[in-house]
Amino acid sequence: MIFLADFSVIKPDFGLIFWTTIAFGLFWLLMAKYAFRPIAEALKEREDDIQNSLDEAKKAREEMAKMKSEHENLLAQAREERSKILKEAKLVGDNMVSEAKAKAKEEANRIVATAKEQIENEKMAAMIDIKNTSGKMALDIAEKVIQKELASSKEHQSFVQKLVSEINLS
């Protein structure tokens, strides 16, 4: 134990340095063979994973930007299509209204034409009736004139004048 009492870490002797160096060298070799390579490989693998993740994130950002532009294009197309459909619907509605107006006008014209034709027919019927009535009156007058035998032509003329004035008044 005397040997240990004389030991000081501050003043190392040659034996301590020698055995510490050999122990450290063996430790270093063992660590190099069994630990440094797996640690280096793990670090390399981690570096690769991080790089792959960064590349995938960049790729995902680019894809998102592409999808966003496609989405905006689709929205623009949808808006265009919607406005086109609205215009077509308005045109169809306007056409339907104009067709309905045209049909209504045509029907009104047909009704007016039918009414005018009916009025004309009734007018003609009334004129025929008047002619028939006036012809019948003329025959009645002629019959009365013939039935009455008049002695003189003066009486005959006065009777005819009287009948004519009656016809003109009524």
Image (tube, grey):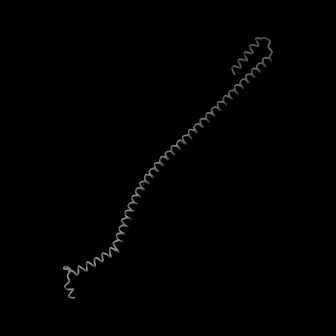
Residue at the outermost bottom position: 1
Residue drawn at x 77%, y 11% is 153
| Quadrant position of the N terminus in the picture | bottom left
Q: Is residue 170 left or right of residue 21?
A: right
Q: Is residue 95 left or right of residue 22?
A: right
Residue drawn at x 53%, y 41% is 91
Quadrant of the rendered structure where residue 97 is? top right
Q: Position of residue 73 (x, y in %)?
A: 45, 50
Residue drawn at x 55%, y 40% is 95
Q: Where is residue 81 in the image (x, y as percent from the top left)?
A: 50, 47
In terms of depth relative to the viewer, which is nearer, 63 or 25? 25
Q: In this view, does 107 lie to the left or right of 85?
A: right
Residue drawn at x 72%, y 23% is 131
| Quadrant position of the C terminus in the picture | top right
In terms of depth relative to the viewer, which is nearer, 145 or 92? 92
Quadrant of the rendered structure where residue 167 is? top right
Depicted 44 relative to depicted 86: above or below: below
Quadrant of the rendered structure where residue 54 is? bottom left
**What number of labels is visible?**
0
Depicted 106 relative to depicted 16: above or below: above
Q: Position of residue 126 (x, y in %)?
A: 70, 27
Q: Position of residue 2 (x, y in %)?
A: 20, 88
In terms of depth relative to the viewer, which is nearer, 134 or 45? 45
Depicted 117 relative to depicted 156: above or below: below
